[in-house]
Image (tube, rainbow, N blue to C red):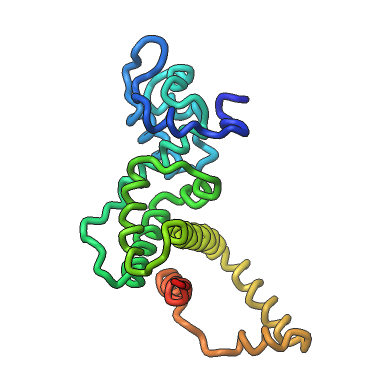
Amino acid sequence: MSRDGGSGAAGVDPEQLWLRPTEPRRGRRPSFSREEIIVAAATLADAEGLEAVTMRRVAAQVGAGAMSLYSYAPDKETLLELMVDHVSGELTVTDPPSGDWRADLKTIAHLQRAHMLRHPWLPAALSTRRVPGPNTLAFLEHALAVLRPTGLDGAAKLEAFAQLTAFVAGHVAHEIAQAAASQSPNRAAAEARYLAAVAADGCHPELAEALSAPGRTLTPEATFTRFLNRLIDGLDTD
């Protein structure tokens, strides 16, 4: 396994990561903390994407040699777990659940969307299984409390929250990609011409009818809200 690679088939050991002391396990005590490493890595990811996050780059950010980081994070996969939980500390909710679980879930989703837009690398980071750390668990605890009035059992509540998070991550990833594509007006015009041609070819009547329907507000926020409402308002609680 390469130092900047993943943790292999076994994945990250959650006990080692979250239940053991955070002090380095070997060697001389370094002049930086695990928190400084995580902040440097998250800042680098915010600015340049996950691909830029290597042990060498992060070490340079904290003014250390790459080898000195490995007692805190033995590989990039572990570092990514730490980064995800670190930024999850921003998802603080001070108000208790209102009792209107659908409204509360929508609030959670909007918080998640804003959070992922601040950290555009998060949707990709969440696409693989993560073991929740303390900050993530605090937010999950709130979401489960929100879902209490549904009468869903524990497993179903966890599934509902996972479904919501996956929806938000997928939508934000698409939103980011669309925003990047919109920077090219030539491409947007070409896409519009293509769809108009397809709608007029007589082979796609359903698509032609859909495209001829009255337009809707297409701001990113309005589009997200429409999709979110369909998801949560139709959530089965049987």
Image vertical order of residue 83 relative to residue 208, above or below: above
Q: Determine the residue positioned at 37% across, 30% down.
A: 19
Q: Quadrant of the N terminus?
A: top right
Left or right placement of residue 90 versus residue 163 in this view? left
Q: Residue furthest top?
A: 28
Q: Nearer the viewer, residue 7 or 38?
A: 7
Q: Nearer the viewer, residue 69 or 177?
A: 69
Q: Could you tell me residue 235's position as x and y percent?
A: 46, 72
Q: Residue furthest left?
A: 95
Left or right placement of residue 5 versus residue 37 in this view? right
Q: Nearer the viewer, residue 27 or 203?
A: 27
Q: Determine the residue positioned at 56% across, 28% down.
A: 4
Left or right placement of residue 21 versus residue 41 in this view? left
Q: Could you tell me residue 2's position as x and y percent?
A: 61, 25
Image vertical order of residue 21 relative to residue 118, above or below: above
Q: Quadrant of residue 115?
A: bottom left
